[in-house]
Image (cartoon, rainbow, N blue to C red):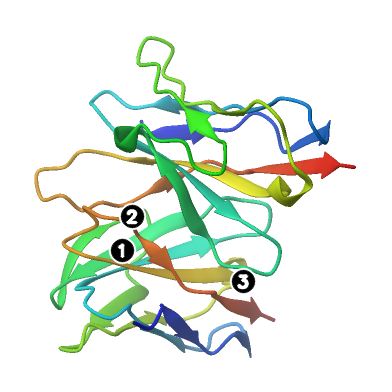
Amino acid sequence: ETGVTQSPTHLIKTRGQQVTLRCSSQSGHNTVSWYQQALGQGPQFIFQYYREEENGRGNFPPRFSGLQFPNYSSELNVNALELDDSALYLCASSLDQGKTEAFFGQGTRLTVV
Amino acid sequence: AQRVTQPEKLLSVFKGAPVELKCNYSYSGSPELFWYVQYSRQRLQLLLRHISRESIKGFTADLNKGETSFHLKKPFAQEEDSAMYYCALSPFTFRGTGKLIFGQGTTLQVKP
C-alpha cells in the first residue's frame, strides 16, 4: 500500500503565472482534499474531490481549480498567481468523502516572486 | 462561524511533566474533533479523534461540549513528544464532505 505523494516538492513561480500541483492518493482512496498552509498558520481547506466531482469548497477564489482523475489522483491549478499564494499546499486522501482518517502528503512548497 | 482556536503558539515543558494543549472550537452543530501531529521532517498525521475515545502514545482528549473545548493531555511528557500539534474540527454536513478546519497549531517542546 503506497502513501499520498505530491509533486513537485518545491516550486518557484512569478506573479501572474499559472501553476499545477499534483497528488497521488493512497491506494483505495476515492476522496482527495487540498489545503493551503501559510507560514505560521494551520492548513486551510481549499476543496475536495470525490469520485471525480467537486464535493465542497472553502473560501478560495475561482482561480483555484482542481481535477480528479479516474484513478483518483488529483491536480490543483492556480491561475494568475499572487504573492499571497506563497504557501505549503497539502493534499489529503481518504475513503468515502472523509468519513475515515485523512492521510496527508508531504506537501508542495510554492513560492511566488 | 466555524473556528478552531489554539491559544498557545508554543508550550515548553520538562520531560516527565504533565502536558495540556488547549483547543477551543466554535460550531453550532455536533462536530467531530481531531488532534493531528507533525513531527520534525514528517507529514501531518492523525493522533486521535474524539469518537474513538482512545489513548494514543499516552495522549487523551475529552470533548467538552459545554465549554466547546477539546484539550489534549498527557500525564508525563517524553522528549519524543516534541512536535507541532493541530486541533481540527470536521463539521457535520449532509453530503459528508469531511473537510477539516484547523487551528493555528501549538509547538510542544519537551526539554530533557
Give residue A66's position: percent from left, percent from top: 29, 78
Q: Disc 2 is attached to a residue of which chain?
A: A
Mark 2 neighbour density, 10 Å: few (under 14) some (14–19) many (20 or more): some
Amino acid type at mark 1: Phe
Q: Which residue is mark 3?
A: A86
Left or right of A67 on screen, residue B22: right
Q: Disc 1 is attached to a residue of which chain?
A: A
Q: Which residue is mark 1?
A: A47
Mark 2 and mark 1: Cα distance apart in space: 6 Å
- Could one spot residue A81 in this view of the protein? yes
Mark 3 and mark 1: Cα distance apart in space: 18 Å
Dots 2 and 1: beta carbons under 8 Å? yes
Amino acid type at mark 3: Ser
Mark 2 and mark 3: Cα distance apart in space: 18 Å
A26 and A77: which one is in front? Answer: A26
Position above or below: B93 against A44: above
Q: Which residue is mark 2?
A: A58
Give residue B85's position: percent from left, percent from top: 60, 45
